[in-house]
Image: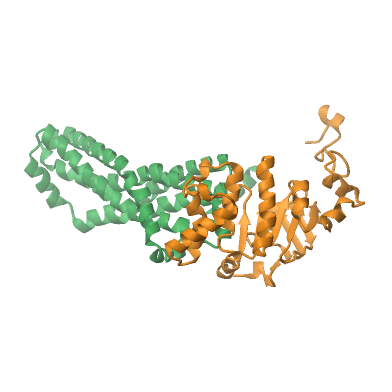
Chain colours: A green, B orange
Amino acid sequence: MTAWLTGIGGFVLHNLTRLGRANLFLLRLLGALRFLFRRPGLLIKQLYVVGVLSLPIILVSGLFVGMVLGLQGYANLVDFGATSSLGTVVALSLIREMGPVLTALLYAGRAGSALTAEIGLMKATEQLASMQMMAVDPFERVLAPRFLAGCLAVPILTGIFTAVGILGGYLVAVVQLGVDGGAFWAQMQAKVELFADVGNGVLIKSAVFGLLANWVALFEGYEALPTAEGVSLATTRTVVITSLAVLGWDFLLTALMFGVW
Amino acid sequence: MRDLSFHRGERLIFDRVNLDIPQGKVTAIMGPSGTGKTTLLQLISGQLRPEAGRVEVDGICVHALQRQELYQLRQRMGMLFQSGALFTDLSVFENVAFPLREHTRLPETLIRTLVLMKLEAVGLRGARDLMPAQLSGGMARRVALARAIALDPQMILYDEPFAGQDPISMAVLVKLIRTLNDALGLTSIIVSHDVKETAAIADYLYLISAGRVVEHGTPQELDCSASPWVDQFMHAHPDGPMSFHYPAPPYAADLLGETPA
């Protein structure tokens, strides 16, 4: 019985300490962002690595998610003769939920895991320590550019994912299933609000998710045990923790933004 | 270094250790594996803080410094890591240029000249376009050495420079460390357990074991030391005061399963 209680206590304490360290890590990271004013080249290189190189997976996934939404929406709406509001259904689901959430999950798998592995291996091979010995702060030179690049990339990728998704929905609904194209766009235009929907969903949600995903990825890499097993564990944890955090925060944010109470 | 104490977990690594490193000389710190020789270098360079005692470099107390001041001090220190710790995404040339680019605003032509001079000093001017993955272990260590001297430091710390080297690259490194020390007027600290090579170039030796300085003196003095421990270490006898066995319960009792868990 006591062993069981000690176990719980140890688990809670361990995770609280880790959370505290993660917060200190974030503070130091934010402080190091100033450095990028002096070295914007570092930021641009990382924007390419985490942003541009994530484009293929985002484009393909966005297209297919939009096409599936078009099909499912049509199958349900056709019974009520309401297929003219298909454009609204596709656009709102993508803008409010699917775009930000799926982009963040895909980003965690494509870029977040890579960031963790990269930082973890740099630590394991003493590259971070040797940088410190050369009086170069890895927070400024290595972590800050990756963090800011990731935080900028996720909202942009979300926007692209959503736009391509809507195109996918259009392809299926209008080109394939014969829904009226004018109604598709007109209904969408009438029902989708710029600030309430696009602002909340594509901008604010994805900004929060981007911060979470990059924070977790860099922290896990930086804290990884400098062994093969440690880096592999950290990479897995990045994907798991980011996914759970994104889904949890999505519920909170949805309740705040679109809640009915 | 005065009354230095340090723990790792439960283990006492250093117990009130006193060391003096003379300027302009090659000082070697030797001891069996696992005695915390690398930890000692991390304490000297301020990567770790001692629990008690002081580490002074050039009259400056290393662990009392703020990060900015510590980084200024480190620009006058070079460190050669056991693995070399080259940046795997940069070529040999860029690795050596890294500290110059980070800490100076020199024009590109001057950087090129400096880098080629440093590479020439370690005999690898022709390897400037290779990537670290294409280098042998000995070459990687020489590139790392060129990088460590890029900013013309006053002091270089060598972490196991000879570990895992073939006889030729070992001889090359031995000669390099000695000539660089004399030509550039450096203070060198070598941490190693390769007795023969280290004794050949060191001006002064410290032997540490179990958290204490066991013996110190010039290589000649230690070579004919009366202490049985020093004799065992310097002449590599497999058994002696340093037992072959890791502390364990009695053999027969252990095999019969009589030991308490």
Q: Position of residue A11 (x, y in %)?
A: 58, 47
* Residue B49 visible somewhere in the drawing: no
- Residue drawn at x 12%, y 52% as measured from the top left: A190
Q: Is residue A24 above or below residue A177?
A: below
Q: On the rendered structure, is B216 left or right of A184?
A: right
Find residue A169 and report its horizontal and vertical position in percent.
18, 39
Q: Position of residue A44 (x, y in %)?
A: 35, 56
Q: Is residue A169 above or below residue A209?
A: above
Is residue B212 visible in the rendered image? The answer is yes
Q: Which residue is the extreme one toward the top?
A: B256
Q: Nearer the viewer, residue B201 or A219?
A: B201
The residue positioned farthest toward the right in the image shown: B226
Q: Residue at x 54, y 42 (%)?
A: B135
Q: Please report the residue visible at 55 percent of the width from the left and 47 percent of the height from the top.
A: A224
The part of the image, by quadrant, that contains residue B248 is: top right
For the N terminus of chain B, which image quadrant? bottom right
Image location of residue B174, percent across then percent down = 69, 50
- Taking depth in this image into account, of A231 and A104 the one nearest to the observer is A231
- Look at the image and tell me in which quarter the C terminus of chain B lies: top right
